[in-house]
Image (spheres, rainbow, N blue to C red):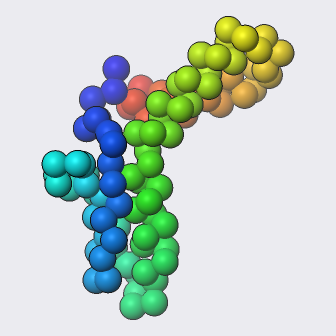
Amino acid sequence: MSKHTPGPWFHKTDFGQVGSVETADGDVIAQAQSLGPLDHERRNANARLIAAAPDLLAALKLVLEDAREFFPTVSAQAITAAEAAIAKAEGER
């Protein structure tokens, strides 16, 4: 079972060199730093992706559950990829 900080997580936009990913209570989960003065777009994209992680994990688990139950023709490769991504997110691999 994953022991990550429960979501939702939020990307806090700022105009400095660091963008924060925080919980609703303001706890900082991660910080994405700019690699240079013109790299704000990349930093913000990284922070948005990190902030979406709990939602992406939950969505993937739902899709995998539905695929197993309702769509038996889903490829073994797709199932294996989803299982591997969930395991990686939960620290099992």
Quadrant housing residue 81: top right
Residue 42 place in picture, x, y as percent: 49, 74
**Residue lying at the far right of the rendered structure:** 73
67 and 80: which one is in front? 67
Residue 51 place in picture, x, y as percent: 39, 52
Q: Is residue 35 visible?
A: yes
Q: How many numbered discs, if any?
A: 0
Q: Quadrant of the N terminus?
A: top left
Figure check: 67 above or below 43: above
Residue for point 24% across, 49% down: 23
56 and 88: which one is in front? 56
Residue for point 30% across, 65% down: 12
Residue 75 place in picture, x, y as percent: 80, 22
Figure check: 7 above or below 41: above
Q: Is residue 88 visible?
A: no
Residue for point 67% across, 8% down: 69
Figure check: 86 above or below 69: below
